[in-house]
Amino acid sequence: MPPGQREYLSGLRCADGKAPAFNRQGSVGIAHDGHVVDAYAVTCASGKSVVIHMDMYHAGYRENRPVEGFTLVSGD
């Protein structure tokens, strides 16, 4: 759900070790499993910018891999 999306995005780190800014762009379609897919613009201070697509409807699943070019820290 949305808190899980924000938790994941808040854990991303840019190459400089700092957290990127992120902004939900909206729902962008339906995944193969029928779930809604959201797009988030993620931007580092360096200017690196990517769009991450996320399906928030997988109860109990926690992504533990960073998006390419980023690292991921955990609040655990």
Image (cartoon, helix red, strand yellow):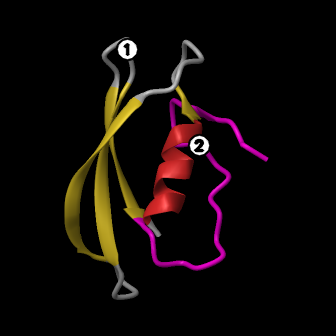
Q: Main secondary structure of the magenta part?
A: loop
Query: Which residue sits at x=35%, y=37%?
Result: 22
Classify mark 1: residues with Cα within 10 Å, few (<14), some (14-19) or many (20+).
Answer: few
- Please identify the residue farthest to the right as the structure is shown: 76
**Residue at image mark 2:** 66
Measured along the vertical axis of the image, is residue 66 above or below residue 1?
above
Q: Earlier in the sequence, mark 2 or mark 1?
A: 1
Q: Secondary structure at mark 2?
A: loop
Q: Position of residue 74 (x, y in %)?
A: 72, 42
Label 2 vs label 1, nearer the camera: 1
Residue most extreme to the bottom = 34
Read off the magenta span.
55-76
Q: In x, y percent, where is residue 13?
A: 56, 28
Q: Is residue 63 magenta?
A: yes
- Depth check: 65 or 23 in front? 23
Identify the residue under disc 1.
45
| Residue 18 relative to residue 28: left or right | right
| Residue depicted at x 64% and y 49% | 65
Up-down: is 39 above or below 59? above
Q: Amino acid at mark 2?
A: Pro
Query: Which residue sits at x=43%, y=63%?
Result: 2
Q: Nearer the viewer, residue 35 or 3?
A: 3
Secondary structure under the numbered disc 1 in the rendered image:
loop
Other-residue count near label 2 (Cα within 10 Å), few / some / many at <14 / 14–19 / ≥20: some
Left or right of 73? Residue 58 is: left
x, y percent for residue 50: 33, 36
